[in-house]
């Protein structure tokens, strides 16, 4: 038997599937984007709210605990009191819980916005993550569709504030009630048809994926995919299918409004939905938002199982090149609608609500494609180098660093192995530091510092070929009194900024 102690195995560093690390560039880009979104929401009179990452699982609505471990779609754990908690799936269900819990204290209509991570316990794939950020705005306690119209206008203003010009986006608006009217008109009204209506909704939701022909099969007998798997259809006849496809195929509401009104005539829900669409159209037009920005479009089918009235979607209409090199329309970056039933689950009384959610990661990708994000300059820190390690010298280096910071200049004192000075300049080069501050014993004796313009030095080193020229040029390095340190560094940084500006305009 070998009593020799086994060498402990090295732990393997691995990122969990469906999750990503965020680097400095991405974090700054998100901060830049969300600051602009937040400014628009604040101008509209919305206030921030933050809810915890965890909620009791039964509060999440569609994910009720119906097994020993309720983790389908959500990440769940059991508390010490044996209650199931889950990481939030979206930002809307926590808002509904917050409103219900604080109903007597909050002022209705309650106008709020939230930004934060949500979690989906689903199979990850390309561009599909288990953790991602959403940015929501909601109005709770406003029953009129003027609140929905305002949401659409705020979405349009948000996209423009982010630099997306008119013609590159469209807010498309539909109404769940109109579809309910269509379903009632073709004989699918009543509680006994609820299952068939749900199958119709699910078929319509596949419009983008399968097109009208595929949806027609799902509305009728069913559809077989490429692998041979068969999905049973909703069982509608040809006339019923034609009427549903007419509704979701409308691209010009003005041209089709009369026929649509005729189709839902005699159905209370359908007539109400058409009136609401017309009302929203009139409101946004009166406010100066024409159909090139906000458009009534019955082909919008997002979340039809969830929403109770108007639904809206923010779509980017410009082309991008996908990973296959194909030109495709960028598509949806967010949307929402009226969900009058969600808060009511907790209250036992009707509580109207409407809101929308922006997919932060997807919108950030779009803005990068347009060159509208990450353009703001982040200047790397000025590096104060370390020549001596005694307490007095270190104190002087730290004092210089603090003086630069106090003047609003990003700065750091080198914290690595100071005994190899060449490594400090290599560090500055890799980091992209614009300036290095050098003070050895000789400089300290005369209270001066060497200030090295690393950007100019790099340029000159590429242009100067012989040693004489190098000595004459001094490679953008100068000696200055300690008292002038901040002023000299500001002067160099300003000159570098002018160089960047000239280069950008060439």
Image (cartoon, helix red, strand yellow):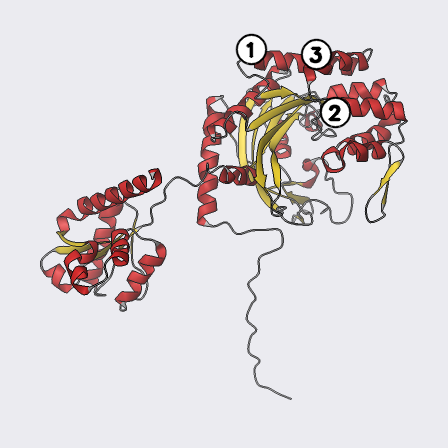
- Residue 90 quadrant: top right
The residue pinned by badge 2 equals 249
| Relative vertical location of residue 443 with respect to residue 295 in this rendering, above or below | below
Residue 79: x, y in percent?
Answer: 65, 48
At numbered mark 2, what does the secondary structure look like: helix, strand or loop? loop
Label 3 close to label 2 by CB (< 8 Å):
no
> Can you say which quadrant of the picture contains the N terminus?
bottom right
In the drawing, what numbered circle is on residue 320? none
Picture residue at 13% right of the left edge, 52% below the top: 480
Residue 70 lies, in percent from the top left, at 73, 46
Residue 165, position in %: x, y? Answer: 50, 27
Other-residue count near label 2 (Cα within 10 Å), few / some / many at <14 / 14–19 / ≥20: some
**Pointer 1 residue:** 286
| Count of marks overlaid on the render | 3
Q: Which residue sits at x=54%, y=24%?
A: 156
Marks 3 and 1, how far apart in space? Answer: 16 Å
Q: Indicate the secondary structure of the residue bearing disc 3.
A: helix
Query: In the rendered image, which quarter is residue 248 located in?
Result: top right
């Amino acid at each position: 038997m070998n009593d020799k102690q086994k060498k402990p195995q090295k732990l393997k560093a691995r990122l969990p599937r469906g999750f990503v690390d965020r680097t400095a560039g991405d974090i700054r880009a998100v901060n830049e984007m969300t600051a602009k979104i937040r400014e628009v929401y604040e101008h509209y009179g919305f206030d921030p709210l933050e809810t915890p990452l965890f909620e009791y699982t039964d509060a999440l609505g569609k994910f009720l605990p119906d097994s020993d471990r309720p983790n389908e779609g959500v990440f769940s754990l059991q508390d010490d009191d044996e209650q199931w908690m889950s990481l939030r799936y979206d930002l809307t269900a926590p808002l509904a819980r917050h409103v219900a819990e604080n109903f007597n204290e909050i002022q209705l209509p309650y106008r709020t916005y939230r930004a934060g991570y949500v979690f989906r316990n689903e199979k990850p794939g390309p561009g599909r993550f288990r953790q991602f950020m959403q940015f929501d705005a909601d109005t709770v306690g406003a029953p009129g569709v003027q609140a929905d119209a305002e949401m659409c206008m705020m979405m349009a203003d948000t996209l423009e504030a982010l630099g997306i010009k008119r013609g590159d986006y469209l807010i498309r608006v539909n109404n769940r009630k109109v579809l309910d009217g269509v379903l009632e008109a073709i004989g699918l009204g009543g509680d006994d048809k609820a299952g068939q209506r749900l199958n119709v909704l699910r078929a319509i939701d596949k419009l983008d994926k399968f097109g009208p022909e595929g949806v027609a099969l799902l509305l009728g007998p069913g559809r077989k995919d490429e692998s041979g798997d068969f999905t049973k259809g909703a069982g509608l006849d040809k006339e019923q299918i034609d009427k549903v496809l007419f509704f979701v195929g409308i691209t010009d509401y003005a041209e089709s409004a009369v026929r649509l009104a005729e189709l839902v005539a005699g159905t209370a829900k359908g007539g109400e939905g058409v009136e609401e669409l017309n009302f929203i159209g009139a409101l946004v037009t009166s406010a100066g938002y024409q159909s090139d920005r906000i458009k009534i479009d019955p082909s919008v089918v997002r979340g039809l199982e969830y929403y109770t009235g108007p639904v809206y979607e923010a779509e980017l209409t410009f082309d991008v090149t996908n990973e296959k090199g194909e030109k495709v329309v960028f598509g949806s970056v967010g949307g929402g609608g009226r969900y009058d039933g969600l808060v009511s689950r907790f209250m036992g009384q009707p509580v109207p609500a409407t809101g929308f959610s922006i997919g932060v990661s997807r919108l950030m990708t779009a803005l990068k494609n347009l060159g509208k994000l990450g353009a703001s300059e982040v200047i790397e820190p000025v590096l104060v180098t370390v020549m001596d390690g005694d307490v007095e010298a270190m104190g002087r280096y730290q004092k210089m660093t603090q003086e630069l910071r106090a003047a609003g200049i990003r700065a750091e004192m080198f914290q690595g192995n100071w005994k190899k000075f060449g490594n400090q300049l290599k560090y500055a080069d890799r980091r992209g530091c614009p300036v290095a501050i050098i003070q050895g014993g000789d400089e300290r004796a005369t209270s001066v510092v060497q200030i090295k313009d690393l950007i100019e030095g790099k340029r000159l080193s590429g242009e100067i070929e012989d040693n004489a020229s190098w000595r004459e040029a001094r490679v953008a390095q100068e000696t200055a009194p300690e008292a002038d340190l901040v002023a000299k560094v500001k002067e160099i940084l300003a000159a570098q900024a002018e160089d960047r500006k000239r280069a950008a305009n060439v």
